[in-house]
Amino acid sequence: MAMHVAEAPLALRDVAERQRVSVHYLEQIFARLKAAGLVRSMRGARGGFTLARPPAEIKLSEVIQAVEGPIAPVPCVDDPAVCQWAGVCAVRDVWVEMGAAMIQALESKSLQDLVERQQKKEQP
């Protein structure tokens, strides 16, 4: 969507065709994106979905959290209470570090960054 932001609202069937996924699958994803305030829907013959904000203002972390939920690699990172060993587990410490690195990487990139990367890859 970010690559087609200047166009009219995108129909899910068009997005599904471009991305080679089912419309049903996209309906589930877009419902989550809409609930998170990342996309808007428009009804009617020329309806479809648009980004709710400019691509440069939407962080990848927002998209991942909206679609997948918490970014933590394992549940005990966000909630130590799920594991009785969380307080003494050296492996959890590594998971916490990995989770922090993933969040930092996703927070530092926007949809616009992805658009620019894709455009560079498509240049001859």
Image (tube, rainbow, N blue to C red):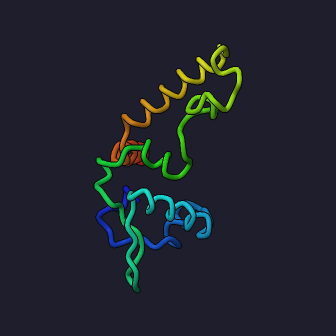
Closer-to-camera residue (116/47): 47
Kindly indicate the quadrant of the structure image that contains residue 77: top right
Percent coordinates x, y for residue 67 in the rendering = 53, 52
Could you tell whether 27 is left or right of 119 in the image? right
- Residue displayed at 50% across by 70% down: 12
Furthest residue in direction right, as rendered: 84
Nearest the camera: 64 or 22? 64
- Residue 55 shows in the view: yes
Residue 123's x, y, as percent? 38, 46
Quarter placement of the N terminus: bottom left
- Residue at 71 percent of width and 24 percent of height: 84
Q: Residue at x 59, y 17 (%)?
A: 93
Compared across the picture, whether 103 is left or right of 88 comes to left
Judging depth in this view, the residue of 63 and 36 nearest the camera is 36
In this rendering, is residue 70 above or below 100?
below
In the figure, 86 relative to 49: above or below?
above
Whether residue 124 is visible here, answered yes or no, is: no
Q: Residue 112 at x, y = what percent?
A: 33, 47
| Residue visible at 37% across and 56% down in the picture | 2
